[in-house]
Structure formats: C-alpha cells, structure tokens
Amino acid sequence: DKVAVCTYISSRNGDPVMSILTPFIEKEQGDVHEAPSPSPPRYLLLVQIPFADDVQNMNMNSFEDAIGNDDAIQVCDEFIDRFMLPSNTLQSEYIPNPGIRSFHKTVINRAIDPSDKERIIIPREQ
C-alpha cells in the first residue's frame, strides 16, 4: 500500500529519471482448493513517472482501413528487418550521454575562462 518516489540513474553519466518504487508481491502456490496467499515482498518494482509534457492525448484513425494485401505486408516486414540492429550492437552502459558531457565541458571551460560566457561546447562524434 506504500510507494516511494525516487530518481533513477541508469549509467554513470545518465540523466536522472523520476520513478516510483513499489514492493512486488508474489502469490504463493498453496493447495488447489485454497486461494493463494501473498508472501512478503522480496523485490522492488521501478516504474518511471511521465512528465506532464510526455502525456499526450492523440486521436488515431482505425487500422481497419490501413491493412493492405500480402505483398504490402511483406514489403513492410522486409523494410523493418533492414533497420534492425544485431544484438549487443549498442551497449548503452558504455555510451556516454552527450548532453551531460557537453555540460561538464562547458562548466570546465567557464571555470578556466569566466569571461567566455557565449561559448557552449558541442560534443563531437568519436
């Protein structure tokens, strides 16, 4: 019946994400004729809280008119398959956040030269 509001940072240079922690209660398997009784929680469930700008009411048309023939479905499937990346291609825990890196470089630059307030360091591809 209780939750905790927290921030979650997934990697070293990651942005904090507002989240809720709640106990994950599992049902124990008892006798077939008895209702399962809840066991004490062993895990916490992390649920990300959306910001006000993240929630949008969207009106979508029905998909009934959008269904094409088998050839169109096959072409779409092949198109999507071409954009799929192999597994372990992007390992997010090793990719630094460019926004945070830019902020840190800008702070260092302004600490060295406080008069240079117009310069913002944009991270370049490595």
Image (cartoon, rainbow, N blue to C red):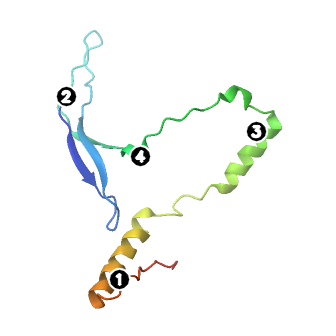
Q: Amino acid at mark 3?
A: Ile
Judging by the rendered image, the residue that carries numbered circle 1 is 117
The label nearer to you, 2 versus 4, is 4
**Disc 4 and disc 3: Cα gap in Å?**
34 Å
The label nearer to you, 3 versus 2, is 3
Query: Considering the numbered disc 3 on the image, is that residue within a helix, a strand or a loop?
Result: helix
**Disc 1 and disc 4: Cα gap in Å?**
30 Å
**Disc 2 and disc 4: Cα gap in Å?**
38 Å
Q: Amino acid at mark 1?
A: Lys
Answer whether labels 3 and 1 touch (C-beta < 8 Å): no
Q: Amino acid at mark 4?
A: Asp
Residue at the (44%, 63%) spot, across then down: 92
Quarter where residue 63 is shown = top right
Instruction: Please give the count of numbered marks on the rendered protein.
Output: 4
For residue 39, the mark is 2
**Disc 1 and disc 2: Cα gap in Å?**
58 Å
Query: Considering the numbered disc 1 on the image, is that residue within a helix, a strand or a loop?
Result: loop
Judging by the rendered image, the residue that carries numbered circle 3 is 73
Instruction: Tell me the crowding category of disc 2: few under 14, some 14 to 19, or many 20 or more residues within 10 angstroms, Cα based.
Output: few
Say which label, 2 or 4, has the lower sequence index. Answer: 2
For residue 53, the mark is 4
Say which label, 3 or 1, has the lower sequence index. Answer: 3
- Can residue 97 be seen here? no
Answer whether labels 4 and 3 touch (C-beta < 8 Å): no
Residue at the (81%, 33%) spot, across then down: 69
Q: Position of residue 83 (x, y in %)?
A: 65, 56
